[in-house]
Image (spheres, rainbow, N blue to C red):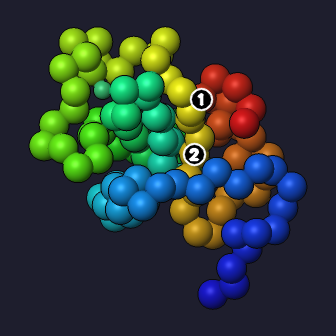
Amino acid sequence: MANKQHKGHRPIHSPEKGELAMIEGILEGSPDAVGVAVIRLDCGCRKMAAVDKNGDPASKVIMYRDNAESICPLCQQDNGDYMRVVKQFISWKSPEPDTATQAMISSKVLGSEQ
Ligand SMILES: [Zn+2]
């Protein structure tokens, strides 16, 4: 198992601990997934969804909040509105897809190349 985490020239977005646990759970439940889109909202809640190699959803969108039973009242109202997104990235499953595929999926899922 080679660790390629620190190679490459794109910025490394590292998921936080709580996110990592969620990502692993989502990947386990989504055999077609090549990664998980992580969307952080300004309220501290997170939105996540697995994506497949074509950039299509490979799971339902999951919303959660660290150390909380449920997402915040605001998210329950607006369902994590796009306007409140503070950071979004894709956490790739190992082995990561090639850069061209990553760029294609990122632009499809996140709306721009990350
Ligand atoms: Zn929230």
Are discs 1 and 2 less than 8 Å apart at CB?
Answer: yes
Report the residue at 64% width, 39% height from top.
Answer: 105
| For residue 114, side relative to residue 9 (left or right) | left
Task: Return the residue at label 1.
Answer: 110
Mark 1, residues whose alpha carbon is within 10 Å: few (<14), some, or many (≥20)? some
Q: Position of residue 92 (x, y in %)?
A: 58, 56
The amino acid on which the numbered mark 2 sits, given as a three-letter code, is Ile
Report the residue at 86% width, 55% height from top.
Answer: 9
Q: Secondary structure at mark 2?
A: strand
Q: Position of residue 22 (x, y in %)?
A: 34, 55
Task: Tell me how far mark 1 sits from mark 2, CA to CA.
Answer: 9 Å
- Looking at the image, which is closer to me, 87 or 55? 87
Task: Return the residue at label 2.
Answer: 90
Single out the residue that lies furthest toward the right. Answer: 9
Say which label, 1 or 2, has the lower sequence index: 2
| For residue 1, side relative to residue 75 (left or right) | right
- Looking at the image, which is closer to me, 60 or 65? 65
Quarter location, residue 41: top left
Single out the residue that lies furthest toward the bottom. Answer: 1
Label ID, residue 66: none
